[in-house]
Image (cartoon, helix red, strand yellow):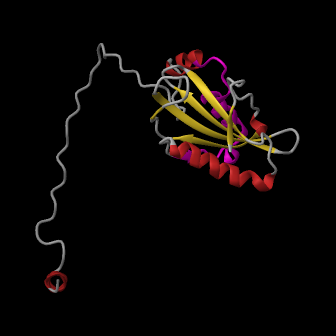
Amino acid sequence: MFTHRTDLTSLPLSREQVVAIIESINTPFVAVEGRTNQQAKAFIVGVRNPSGQFSIFIYLHLLEDRACVIWCCDPPEIPMNAYHQFEVEALQFVESMGFMVDNLHFRNLPPDQQEAMLTALPLTHTNLAAFARQSAGGEAGADGQEPLDLSPLEEGVIELQEEAAPEAPAGPVLPPEARAKLARLLGSF
């Protein structure tokens, strides 16, 4: 069971608290109460609380409104032995809205990549409009690569000459006895 948390506008997480992040790989149109039907991205975030208990959040990033809607497991803190059950319920919840999800294997990443991931995802950002501008800006892509420079070349264009491909050997690829076996096999169908 999950409860809508209208009091949350982000998830103030530290890298050490995050148990798991599961991200949608698609952006279906969803209808959320009080909002227009729009594309969204879903995240399921497992968190270890200072109390030693766990919480699971469902975070919808509404792309048009540049806002989020957050649900939390009910009760808000659960013991370790109930974590898997609540994670399965969270998966069913987001899949029922049309999301397909993938586990980002957050805990398997080195600490610097974990920090980079938390910065690159909208989860911890309170101003999603600024986050969208930052993400759309000239920053490196999700794979860490710089964006391609697609500006026109001014000079120094070098024309490349294509080399002819080597000729394929003439004749059959299979020896005659292998072709005969293949013909018998195919003829038996």
Q: Looking at the picture, how far across and down is residue 73, in whole percent?
A: 72, 41
- Return the residue nearer the eye: 111 or 126: 126
Which residue lies most toward the top here? 154
Question: Please, which residue is most extreme toward the right here?
Answer: 51
Give the quadrant of the N terminus. Answer: top right
Q: Nearer the viewer, residue 176 or 69?
A: 69
Residue in view at x 16 percent, y 60 percent: 168
Q: Nearer the viewer, residue 72 or 121?
A: 72
From this viewpoint, is residue 64 visible? yes
Residue that protrudes farthest toward the left in the picture: 171
In the image: residue 174, left or right of residue 85: left
For the point 76% across and 32% down, the residue is: 14
Which residue is pictured at 11% across the width and 66% down the height? 170
The C terminus sits in image quarter: bottom left
The answer to whether residue 103 is magenta is yes
Residue 127: percent from the left, percent from the top? 63, 17
Q: What secondary structure prevails in the magenta region?
A: helix
Count of numbered circles on the image? 0
Q: Quadrant of residue 124?
A: top right
User: Relative to residue 188, is residue 131 drawn left or right?
Assistant: right
Position of residue 32 relative to residue 49, above or below, is above
Tell me the magenta residue range.
101-128
In this view, the residue farthest toward the front is 33
Front residue of 31/103: it is 31
Residue 128 spot, x, y in % from top left: 59, 19
Q: Is residue 112 magenta?
A: yes
Regarding residue 103, the answer to whether it shows in the image is no
In the rendered structure, the answer to whether residue 144 lies left or right of residue 70 reads left
Residue 121 location in percent, x, y?
60, 30
Residue that appears at 19% across and 84% down: 185
